Image (tube, rainbow, N blue to C red):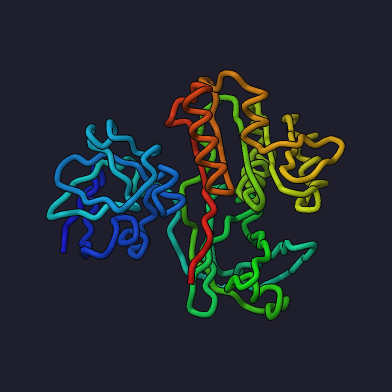
Amino acid sequence: MAKVTIVPENIELSITDEESILTNALVQKLNLPHSCKSGTCGACKCKVISGEIRLDPYNTSVLTDEEKHQGYTLLCRAHPIGEVTLEIPHALKGFPIKTLPARVEKIDKFNDMAILTLRLPPSQNFGFYAGQYIDILTNGKNRSYSIASSPTSPSTIEVHVRYHKGGVFSEYVWNELKESQILRFKGPLGNFQLSETNLPILMVCTGTGFAPIKSILEYMAANNIKRELHMYWGNRMFADYYMLDLLNNLQQKMGFKLTLCLSADKKDGCVSSWVTQAVENDFNDLSGYEVYACGNLNMIEDLYELASGNLGLIRQNFFSDAFTPSVG
């Protein structure tokens, strides 16, 4: 058993050899910075003040050898050896993680997409930041879904479920789940959220990566947050898009620029390319921007390399929520 102390709040964790620091913290309902939980996004990067860390395999582009030499690690890949001290500012900031029931108020299905509206118990308060996610508990397993609704509508939460053949939760949604049934979920989780700056924003998403982006956009609109913003949304086919009327209404209200990208289809008003290619074509300097990327892991990795390499983005200004397939 190893001991981890997190400063400046002096939080102490006792961790087994099999657990990562992040896994242990989440079990203790301590929502440390994280997103993908697989060593691919860098959201959980933090400074090791003292002690030794063993790391599971990770994406070396989000934790370079130079950063490791400077003492940085990834919480989701880190196993402490003996006593370790980490520096994580505002580790106790945020909303408490809860496990709650929710009634399925509405199920809207079209093509291979289901929009679930879940009504929370009137006696329970559930706070979250726009961009965070929940774990839905089904048949003894957890499945992670971004909250697509805004914190400004606290009585319900919305999740977007893409059908995947054999998927534990999506098969359940398509074949068994009915309105008025009760689901249980744990959250809020993750640290993908809007920063409190005035920098211009580049939002890039693929597929259901639109969900946390929608949450952030609705939050910005409700709070009259005015920042320069350009959004790119990529799909294979035009039929993969959903909620375009809502998105167009948000665009008109907020005045941001919207680019829809199709990688395997052609449609008037859409760009026929990968989203990363469209970004590369439209920008030559992102040094003064913040980038918010959600969806396919390969897209996020490619965008990170492009933005922080050729386009000069400050690495700390890249925020991502990588969607990785659930196994088992």
Instruction: Measuring from the top left, give residue 144's x and y in whole percent.
Output: 53, 62
The outermost residue toward the left is 82
Q: Residue furthest front?
A: 264
Image coords of residue 84 (percent x, y): 17, 49
Q: Residue at x 32, y 58 (%)?
A: 25
Q: Is residue 328 left or right of residue 151?
A: left
Residue 26: give x, y in percent of width and height: 37, 60
Front residue of 225 and 270: 270
Residue 127 seen anywhere in this rendered image of the structure? no
Residue beneath the point at 59% across and 19% down: 284
Task: Please tell me how many numbered marks the rendered image carries.
Answer: 0
Q: Is residue 144 visible?
A: yes
Quarter occupied by residue 65: top left
Quadrant of the rendering where the N terminus is positioned: bottom left
* Nearest to the observer: residue 139 or residue 188: 139
Q: Residue at x 72, y 30 (%)?
A: 256
Name the residue nearer the viewer: 127 or 118: 118
